[in-house]
Amino acid sequence: MRVLHFYKTYYPDSWGGVEQAIRQMCVGTARLGITNDVLTLTRNGGPARMEIDGHVVHRVPQDIEIASNAMSFAAIRRLAELARTADVVHYHFPWPFGDLAHFLARVKKPSVVTYHSDIVRQKTLLKLYSPLMHRFLANVDGIVATSPNYFASSDVLRRYGDKVRAIPFGLDRGTYPRPTPERLAHWSAEVGERFFLFVGVLRYYKGLHILLDALARCEYPVVIVGAGPIENELREHARRLGLKHVRFLGAVDEQDKVALLTLCYALAFPSHLRSEAFGISLLEGAMFGKPMISSEIGTGTSYINIDGETGLVVPPSDPAAFGNAMRTLWEDPALAQAMGQRAGERYAALFTSEKMAADYAELYCDVAKKST
């Protein structure tokens, strides 16, 4: 079986959660005999075709971007070409241009879409896009919610409930590099041996202003890994609050990220809006056996992190509650260790790449059979 993934960004241009999810799908299903291709847009030039982790990535130039909606005229023609040799076309939502390209390329192959998130911020544009969105979701053969929580809380997904199934993201620990002792020693000396860690692209819905406001009331060391559109704004916010115990490291490579995940005391994940549908970096924390602090936003974050079991879940946009949760873990190392152990066990039971790959392979087979 051959599966074609289509999304606006991918490695090596971008390293966000959706890109990691697609990568894990490709690597995991390849072990089950599925050949994967990824079609993506690029603003950086470079090769039109490259191989990453055993799957082929096809890159076409991005022409324009409006409200995070990247578009490419060449992508429509390339989608039509690649779809002809695919058994299943796998889209990743939300991406309005991807919906439009599906129809303009006249894709007739079985198709599925992973529904990564509701559209939360662009309310006005959503009204204009809504007819295309619903036509697209009605046209595809299968829709994947990334957690039972998100399916239950999304008005859009419930509308298509008869063809929605929940397949949580999974990670393969083996695809992550092992940090060298030298790298671990470097970061231990750099940031200390006990700190809260945030990893992610610095976007509006990540709620980092909430974390910074919480730190104005306490002095726990926090390391923030990642770059993004609001990085300067957050650095200025920390400066205004006079925070001396927060380190912004910017983007780091995978070796450094894994070293920091290995060393950290707990994961701080303050996302406060439904744009955070799952939280790949939160799952990475669970995979590394770390206790977590997250907010209840009715999405997959509370499927990964179970309050009182694998960590603490607090109300969204509540700095005092987030700070109290940090205090609870910091002052009770035995509790933090026990929660981290249970987080690792939950990852092993529900969130491995093998389980996700098996579920997606079953979905691909089901939609392919229905079209014959």
Image (cartoon, rainbow, N blue to C red):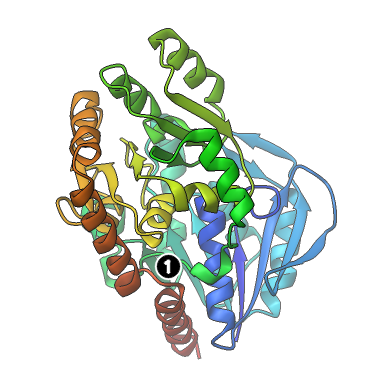
Residue plotted at (20% across, 51% down) = 334
Indicate the quadrant where residue 212 lies.
top left
Indicate the quadrant where residue 214 lies.
top left
**For residue 30, above or below residue 106:** below
Give the x, y percent position of residue 287: 39, 62
Q: Quadrant of the N terminus?
A: bottom right
Residue 121 seen anywhere in this rendered image of the structure: no
Is 128 on the left-hand or right-hand side of 207?
Answer: right
- Amino acid at the residue labelled 1: Gly
Q: Secondary structure at mark 1?
A: loop
Disc 1: CA contacts within 10 A as few (<14), some (14-19) or many (>=20): many
Give the x, y percent position of residue 354: 44, 78
Which residue carries the number 1 mark?
170
Give the x, y percent position of residue 252: 62, 42
Residue 272 seen anywhere in this rendered image of the structure: yes
Give the x, y percent position of residue 4: 62, 71
**For residue 310, above or below residue 166:** above
